[in-house]
Image (spheres, helix red, strand yellow):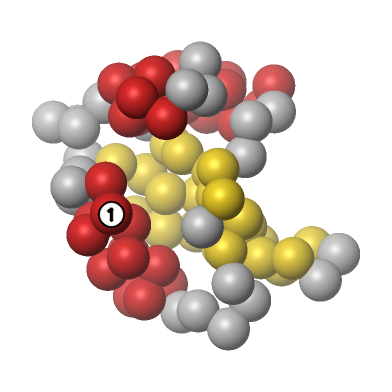
Amino acid sequence: MKPIVTEKAVMLIESQNILTFETDKSKTKEQIKKDFEEIFNAKVEKIKTLVKRNKKYAYIKLKNEFPAIDLATKLGLI
């Protein structure tokens, strides 16, 4: 998983508690959720995926007790 840092991605972090990642195209939402929770030790509320230009993007909404902005700061995205 590779974090995406665009203006839109930063707005989603701040307004909706959503982190955006580029993922392997073959992974399912459940696999993405399991990997994310193991790596970052944060609970996922919901995942939306998008396949665009032969790349798969995962929009990961975190539960309210895990602020996305804190995780983004730890990753150096903000």
Q: Name the residue located 58 percent from the left edge and 83 percent from the top edge.
A: 26
Q: Please, which residue is most extreme toward the left here?
A: 65
**Dividing the picture into quarters, in which one does residue 42 lie?**
top left
Q: Name the residue located 26 percent from the left edge and 46 percent from the top edge.
A: 40
Q: Is residue 68 left or right of residue 25?
A: left
Q: Position of residue 14 (x, y in %)?
A: 45, 18
Whether residue 16 can be seen here: no
Q: Is residue 73 left or right of residue 7?
A: left
How many numbered circles does the render carry? Answer: 1
Q: Position of residue 8 (x, y in %)?
A: 67, 27
65 to 76, vertically: above or below: below
Q: Is residue 75 left or right of residue 5?
A: left
Q: Name the residue located 13 percent from the left edge and 31 percent from the top edge.
A: 65
Q: Position of residue 57 (x, y in %)?
A: 62, 57
Q: Name the residue located 37 percent from the left edge and 44 percent from the top edge.
A: 61
**Dividing the picture into quarters, in which one does residue 62 lie?**
top left
Q: Which residue is mark 1?
A: 39
Q: Position of residue 28 (x, y in %)?
A: 46, 79
47 to 41, vertically: above or below: below
Q: Please, which residue is most extreme toward the right here?
A: 53
Q: Is residue 37 left or right of residue 23?
A: left
Residue type at mark 1: give it: Ile
Closest to the observer: 14 or 25?
Answer: 25
Whether residue 67 can be seen here: yes
Q: Residues within 10 Å of mark 1 (few under 14, many from 20)?
A: few
Closest to the observer: 27 or 39?
Answer: 39
Q: Under tag 1, what secondary structure?
A: helix
Q: Please, which residue is most extreme toward the bottom here?
A: 26
